[in-house]
């Protein structure tokens, strides 16, 4: 029997889905951890990014944040935070993932506001809008496509890296893979591949879903600029 | 490489201790060597694959979408899943880690190279054609040199993220300094995790600076323009 057939067979066993610690349990854990990290990231990064973009300064700091987090391994933060007083578990994992969700959210919020046409801002000021009104009624709506792009990048990244939580006993779908490696490739090759397929499938599904959401919330006239936006956000995307 | 046997400082558990580094110098250096070697090989291979792909995307506009989409999908697949999908077939060796790392570096280098090539001004390309350059001559003498800053940006980003990503290789026993992260985590030994983190961070920074210096040497014209 080929390895691939073993993987299909493993996935076909209903008990592997419904057992305690089975696929459903791990999937719920995975999604709960990811959602918490992304939401926490939004709460921190969006107000900060919008404010910096509105004040039109701090661009250097935003770039530094994304470059520095790029050089820090996810595994480092996962293990470091687990060794603090927080202890091993989901809280540590959520905090570590939040750190990696922040750069794309922050960079896109900042860029979104910076990209607002200066003439539009002038017109808004000429109409007598205060700083807050301009932010709320003019700049924020115009930067929604950027916020959506940042959200998508952050969500995909967090769902992908949440798989590493298994290496610090944090749960999630990665546990299936890590358990398989624990049993050995000869014994659990099928389980390892099945776990890989599940994790990869989930990441691609999240990417696809939020790509559609991003498109839906982007007003038609702004859709053409999408290529530019992705290119501009490169540093934060990786 | 078997997991290094480590000496631990007694009793107290500080966040950083020179003693740990002194007692385990050899193990740290061996891991650092594996880490740097995996990174260098991965980035080199990724560049050798990415640049031709980017040139194809640049020459044949119809291929741009599919090439970027394919590398994008490969990039989206989480590293852990990729290693899990590769290991049963390729085995638990450095080769598996290397294939995974190359897969990740592709998107960044391809995207930045395409961006660099697209920024070659049309009049320049026109002049090149007028001077009688063929497709390959123009690519080699005109397009690629002008796209070099873009290519280097891609290679630098890929290098820094590869240095960080090597650590996931611990899953199949070849994670370079990543081994210290998981061993230190299991032992609850803070200095070990912190030391490895700092060294990995410094390695990324050092390689980035080296590549930045290399870029300055290779593209002297960008400096004179900036002045």
Image (spheres, coloured by chain):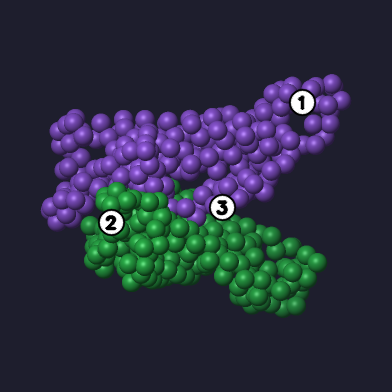
Chain colours: A purple, B green
The chain letter for the residue carrying disc 2 is B
A83 on left or right of B144: left
Report whether mark 1 lies on the same chain as mark 3. Answer: yes
How many callouts does the rendering have? 3
Q: CA distance from mark 1 to mark 2?
A: 59 Å
The chain letter for the residue carrying disc 1 is A
Q: What is the crowding at mark 1: few (fewer than 14 residues within 10 Å), some, or many (at least 20)? A: few
SS for dot 1: helix
Residue B143 screen position, x and y as percent: 66, 69
Q: Which residue is mark 3?
A: A67
The correct choice, above or below, for A80 with respect to B10 in the image is above
- Quadrant of the frame with the C terminus of chain B: bottom right
Sequence-wise, the earlier of marks 1 and 3 is 3
SS for dot 3: helix
The correct choice, above or below, for A45 with respect to B222 in the image is above
- Residue at 26% over, 68% down: B1
- Residue at 69% over, 23% down: A136
> Which quadrant holds residue A215?
top right
A67 on left or right of B218: left
Tell me the number on the disc at residue B10.
2
Q: What is the crowding at mark 2: few (fewer than 14 residues within 10 Å), some, or many (at least 20)? A: few
Can see residue B53? no
The correct choice, above or below, for A207 with respect to B54 in the image is above
- Residue at 62% over, 49% down: A63
Residue A33 screen position, x and y as percent: 37, 33
Residue B225 screen position, x and y as percent: 79, 67
């Amino acid at each position: 029997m080929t390895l691939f057939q073993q993987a299909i067979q493993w996935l076909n066993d209903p008990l592997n889905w419904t057992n305690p610690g089975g696929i459903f349990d791990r999937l719920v854990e995975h999604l709960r951890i990811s959602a918490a990290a992304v939401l926490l990231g939004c709460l921190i990064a969006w107000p900060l990014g919008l404010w910096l973009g509105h004040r039109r300064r701090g661009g250097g700091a935003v770039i530094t944040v994304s470059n520095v987090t790029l050089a820090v391994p996810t595994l480092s933060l996962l293990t470091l935070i687990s060794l603090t007083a927080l202890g091993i578990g989901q809280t540590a994992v959520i905090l570590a993932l939040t750190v990696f969700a922040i750069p794309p959210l922050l960079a896109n919020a900042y860029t979104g506001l910076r990209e607002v046409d200066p003439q539009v801002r002038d017109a808004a000021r000429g109409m007598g809008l205060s700083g807050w009104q301009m932010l709320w009624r003019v700049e924020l709506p115009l930067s929604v496509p950027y916020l959506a792009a940042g959200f998508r990048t952050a969500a995909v990244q967090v769902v992908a890296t949440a798989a590493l939580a298994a290496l610090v006993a944090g749960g999630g779908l990665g546990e299936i893979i890590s358990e398989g490696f624990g049993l050995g490739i000869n014994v659990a090759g099928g389980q390892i591949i099945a776990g890989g397929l599940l994790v990869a499938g989930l990441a691609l599904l999240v990417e696809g879903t939020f790509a559609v959401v991003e498109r839906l919330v982007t007003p038609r006239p702004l859709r053409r600029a999408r290529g530019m936006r992705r290119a501009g956000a490169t540093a934060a995307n990786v | 490489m078997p997991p290094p046997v480590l000496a631990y400082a007694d009793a107290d558990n500080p966040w950083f201790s020179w003693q740990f580094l002194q007692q385990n110098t050899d193990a740290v250096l061996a891991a650092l060597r594996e880490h740097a070697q995996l990174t260098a090989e991965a980035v080199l291979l990724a560049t050798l694959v990415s640049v031709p792909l980017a040139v194809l995307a640049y020459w044949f506009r119809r291929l741009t979408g599919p090439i970027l989409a394919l590398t994008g999908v490969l990039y989206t697949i989480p590293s852990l899943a990729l290693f899990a999908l590769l290991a049963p077939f390729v085995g638990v060796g450095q080769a598996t880690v290397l294939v995974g790392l190359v897969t990740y570096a592709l998107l960044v280098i391809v995207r930045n190279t395409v961006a660099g090539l697209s920024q070659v001004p049309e009049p320049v390309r026109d002049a090149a054609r007028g001077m009688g350059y063929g497709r390959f001559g123009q690519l080699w003498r005109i397009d690629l040199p002008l796209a070099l800053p873009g290519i280097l940006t891609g290679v630098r980003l890929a290098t820094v993220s590869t240095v960080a990503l090597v650590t996931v290789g611990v899953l199949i026993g070849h994670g370079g300094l990543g081994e210290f992260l998981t061993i230190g985590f299991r032992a609850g030994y803070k200095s070990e995790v912190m030391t490895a983190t700092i060294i990995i961070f410094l390695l990324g920074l050092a390689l980035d600076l080296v590549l930045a210096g290399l870029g300055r040497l290779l593209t002297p014209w960008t400096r004179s323009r900036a002045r």
